[in-house]
Image (cartoon, rainbow, N blue to C red):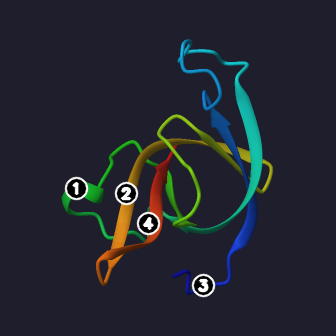
Amino acid sequence: MFNVNGMPASLIQYNRNNEESIYDDQDQQTIDIVVCPYNVDQAVRFGIYTIPEATGYFIIKNDVDVKEGDQIVFHNKTYTILQVNDNWIWNKIANISVAVK
């Protein structure tokens, strides 16, 4: 459930192919995704979703394989994902919100 008009971005996924070397910086793949960005000034800053070093947040569709440490390229700027949170509605994951730096 993605109720906004998303904007195109690229997700650089690291270490998805080789299980033995989890710190391989050459093991990466880039996929195109749709994101909804919002600034940290617009975010509600309380509870477990508050990250002091985060400079922004993105909402991503629930079927995207995203982990901490991956990178999002949006408007020719690269953001590193600090934290991944699932947003639940009616006992299923509606979308994923990520904090980036």
Q: Are marks 1 and 2 in contact (CB under 8 Å)?
A: yes
Q: Mark 3 or mark 4, which is nearer the start of the sequence?
A: 3
**Looking at the image, residue 71 lies above or below residue 85:** above
Cα distance, mark 1 to mark 2?
9 Å
Cα distance, mark 2 to mark 4?
19 Å
Cα distance, mark 1 to mark 3?
24 Å
Cα distance, mark 4 to mark 1?
17 Å
Mark number displayed over residue 4: 3
Amino acid on which disc 4 is placed: Asp
Residue at horizontal 32 percent and vertical 70 percent from the top? 44
Residue, disc 4: 41
Residue 2 lies, in percent from the top left, at 56, 80
Q: Mark 2 or mark 1, which is nearer the start of the sequence?
A: 1
Residue 43 lies, in percent from the top left, at 39, 69
| Element at label 4 | loop
Residue at horizontal 67 percent and vertical 83 percent from the top? 5
Residue, disc 1: 48
Looking at the rendered image, the disc whose residue lies closer to the viewer, 4 or 3, is 3
Residue at horizontal 60 percent and vertical 84 percent from the top? 4
